[in-house]
Image (cartoon, helix red, strand yellow):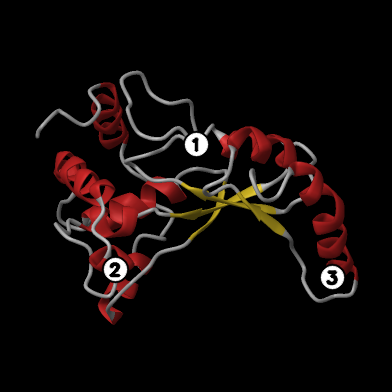
Amino acid sequence: MGAQVTPEDVLGPVLDTLQALRQEGKTQAIGCCAWGGEYASVCRVLESGAFDTVLVGYSILNPTSGRAAPAGFSGRDFGNVMQVAADHGTSAVVLKVLESGALTGAKAPHPTSVLARRPSDEFTRNAARAQSLRFLARAGQSLTQAAIRFALGDARVNVVLVGFSALDQIDEAAAASTGEGLAQADLAGIEDLYRSDFTLAL
């Protein structure tokens, strides 16, 4: 939402159409997207309470869809939209939980990724920052699983979308959905990294 679609557009004809589809039984739930929009506009839409879900970017490397930006944090601020959503009965559907593969330990984008064809400074930066999170990988938990558990551990999150490029990655991701969250010591270590903008352990 922003330059092309205004909150008034969304809460007017767009919402009318989505609600009509639900009344016709063609969908059970309706959602909106907070990814890439203007967050003041997104919040205006969420404050209507009209949507069941909102699609957000949320990861260990950038948790600002779910909290105020930590002191010292230099990434993009996603405006704590998950809390606005929760306050109005809307649950979050998370994408970017693995930051395009940077939170799998990959040093470069997968060859099938659009990022492999269009090199991204953001991926390079995220891959470097992810090196500070190596303490999360241990017997019984890969870095990938820790990243998924981070998102699933938030009660405001209803769904975590995980990309994969091989069948074994499906098993790895599924094993992270047991309901076991990150240990408090791990969460404290992540918080330390926010305060230093991921310069610790680099």
At mark 3, the secondary structure is: helix
Q: Which residue is mark 3?
A: 21
Q: Label 2: which residue?
A: 172
Identify the residue shown where x is 33% and y is 55%: 98
Structural crowding at the residue carrying mark 3, measured as other residues with C-alpha within 10 Å and reported as few (<14), some (14–19) or many (≥20): some
In which quadrant of the rendered view does residue 40 lie? top right
- Residue name at image x 80 percent, y 40 percent: 48
Left or right, 24 with respect to 124, comes to: right
Q: Nearer the viewer, residue 193 or 182?
A: 193
Q: Nearer the viewer, residue 108 or 80?
A: 108
Residue at image position (64%, 45%) is 3
Residue at the limit of the structure toward the front, as seen here: 3
Residue at position x 28%, y 21% from top?
195
Hey, what amino acid is under mark 3?
A: Leu
Q: Amino acid at mark 2?
A: Glu
Quadrant (top left, top right, bottom left, bottom right) of the C terminus: top left
Which residue is the extreme one toward the top? 71
Q: Which residue is mark 1?
A: 78
Which amino acid is tagged 1?
A: Phe
How packed mark 2 is, by other alpha carbons closer than 10 Å (few <14, some 14-19, many 20 or more), is: some
Sequence-earlier tag: 2 or 1: 1
Q: Nearer the viewer, residue 186 or 190?
A: 190
Q: Earlier in the sequence, mark 3 or mark 2?
A: 3
Whether label 3 touches label 2, CB < 8 Å: no
